[in-house]
Image: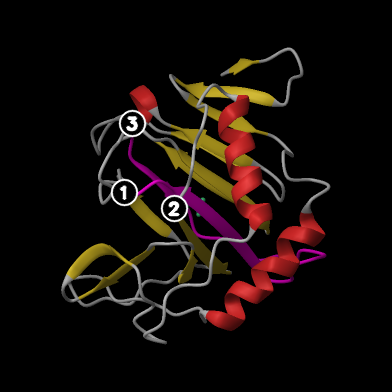
Amino acid sequence: MLFSEEENTIQIAPDAYLLKGFLLGHSQGLLKDLNLVLKANPLRHMKTPSGYHMSVAMTNCGDWGWVTDEQGYRYSQRDPVTNLPWLSMPAIFRQLATSAANSVGFDGFKPDACLVNRYAIGAKLSLHQDKDEADYSHPIVSFSLGLPALFDFGGITRDAAKQAIHLEHGDVVVWGGQSRLNYYGIRRIKAGTHPLLGPYRFNLTFRRTQN
Ligand code: SIN
């Protein structure tokens, strides 16, 4: 890992960065708008194409939302639960995601989708690549809130060596360019209580899904 002068921007791979504590100072604003998103588009455990319910509860905001069911993985402009468009992406989400991307050289990132993941204790996200977007030239920006997690960041093949990165409340990971299609996942969340989010980890992942 390479540290920047400020020691809070850590390069974890080519074109991939951990921004330690980037969101600290914005928790109240983020959580206030997160509550609005959860009211409009409730969390749900989606089904994978092979019929399993995911342990992570998910919802979305923005123009496009990521969904999965028996028909496969895809982006949809409507929430299949409410049959309405997803709530617009709150300005504080968009601004912080764009500014995190800019801070490591991905200028002009304009996310059109924000996937909200809620991890209860024991929930995990298996190793996978993000390949449902139209154009891989845009980075992925991922916010961590609440309980800590171990983020496995691998390489372009499933069996490539992985780094286990400790993510805490306020951290952001940005990856794109040479690392855009790297495999990654979240290990099972360990028991704990966060002062703001109790027994949960929330993750907001920002993507540009359309050209
Ligand atoms: C995701 O990319 O959907 C989740 C990543 C995370 O929880 O940190």
Tell me: residue 59, above or below residue 64. below
Gap in Å between the C-alphas at discs 1 and 3?
Answer: 11 Å
Q: Viewed as shown, does residue 13 lie left or right of 5? A: left
Camera-side mark, 3 or 2: 2
In the rendered structure, does residue 206 fall within the stretch colored magenta? Answer: yes
Q: Mark 2 and mark 1 in contact? Answer it, CB < 8 Å.
A: yes
Magenta stretch in the rendered image: 182-210
**Residue in view at x 57 percent, y 24 percent:** 104
The residue that label 1 is drawn on is: 210
Q: Which mark is residue 112?
A: 2
Residue 31 image offset from top left, x and y in percent:
73, 65
N-term mark: 3 or 2: 2
For this orientation, the residue located farthest to the bottom is: 82
The residue that label 3 is drawn on is: 137
Q: Residues within 10 Å of mark 1 (few under 14, many from 20)?
A: some
In the rendered structure, does residue 196 fall within the stretch colored magenta? Answer: yes
